[in-house]
Image: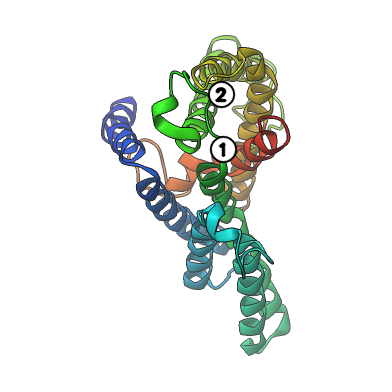
Amino acid sequence: MLRQRLASAAILVPVVVAVFLLGEAWIDAFVALVAGLAAWETFGLLAAAGYRGFARYGVALAVAVVLAGAVPASWRAAPPWSVVDPVLAVLALGWLAAGVGAFAARDPREGFAAWVATAFGAGYVGLLAFAARLLADAPTLPSGAALGGLGGGRGWVLVLVATVWAYDSFAYAFGRAFGRRRFLEHISPSKTYAGLVGGVGGAVVVAAVAMTALGRSPVEGIPAGVLVGLAAQAGDLAESMLKRAAGAKDSGHLIPGHGGMLDRIDSFLFAAPVLVVYVALVAR
């Protein structure tokens, strides 16, 4: 298993780095692809849990929501996007269309269940739209910032990725080394308080380093690291709850040793909105 995980990481990490260096358009396309794969796995889990939705339509809607998040601010300053945010417009119209499609079900209970499952699946994975919005709208970096060459969007996305990965890595290491007392075992039996504390601590340290590289005060790494770390843990637990309901160990088998795509991005689904709100309220 460890050999598989290392081999997969050796392939995936260079791909992610290459996409990141190529620029915003490539990142948006990559995030949309990830969203499509994760959404397909999500609808498979929902079906296994007894909530069968309109899977193909839900996948398309999730991807559309993510792409709507990538609409640049300059476009949103003019009609029609100056009247309604593109993410909200796509999501609302998509949910309405799913509801109308559910009318065709002979049993209203089945139709309603399909509507709810489709709305949830698309909206859940569609949370990646916040990562796309962070890329599009993040504040510019001050002159002299170590990562100034990346620009504000990629710089803040790097904060997101590095902080979430730090939380996951430190939580795993501290949980293995010091984990005794567990929490929320009915959802995920491997989660420990030691892992939680270690993960948050690691997230704070990495966030502080990243903030410094963005030309900001390292003190900002404390609230950002805590918030993003806790959100990452909540995102992991949310997916675990879905897998428990479906009776599945992994969301899929796409990545040997790592499970499915949803298993890799579950933390980001909750962490991305939290960091966007933090940037909007504090980091402008």
The label shown at residue 15 is: none
Q: State the residue in front, 6 or 227.
A: 227
Between marks 1 and 2, how big is the CA–CA gap?
A: 10 Å
The vertical placement of 223 against 231, above or below, is above
Q: Residue at 53% across / 33% down in the picture? A: 140
**Crowd around label 1: few <14 · some 14–19 · many ≥20 (10 Å):** many
Residue bearing the label numbered 2: 167
Residue type, mark 2 in image: Tyr
The answer to whether mark 1 and mark 2 are in CB contact below 8 A is yes
Q: State the residue in front, 35 or 26.
A: 26
Which of the marked residues, 1 or 2, is nearer the chain's N terminus? Answer: 2
The location of residue 129, given as percent across then percent down, is: 55, 52
**Crowd around label 2: few <14 · some 14–19 · many ≥20 (10 Å):** many
Which quarter of the image is occupied by the N terminus? top left
Q: Residue at 50% across / 43% down in the picture? A: 135
The vertical placement of 70 against 275, above or below, is below
Residue bearing the label numbered 1: 267
Q: Residue at 51% across / 57% down in the picture? A: 71
Number of marks present in the image shown: 2
The location of residue 238, given as percent across then percent down, is: 64, 43
Q: Secondary structure at mark 1?
A: helix
The location of residue 157, given as percent across then percent down, is: 50, 35
Q: Secondary structure at mark 2?
A: helix
Q: Residue at 73% across / 35% down in the picture? A: 281
The vertical placement of 142 against 98, above or below, is above
Residue type, mark 1 in image: Ser
Mark yes or no: residue 106 visible.
yes
Mark yes or no: residue 186 visible.
no
The color scheme shown is: rainbow
Which quarter of the image is occupied by the C terminus? top right
Q: State the residue in front, 67 or 188.
A: 67
Q: State the residue in front, 58 or 257.
A: 58
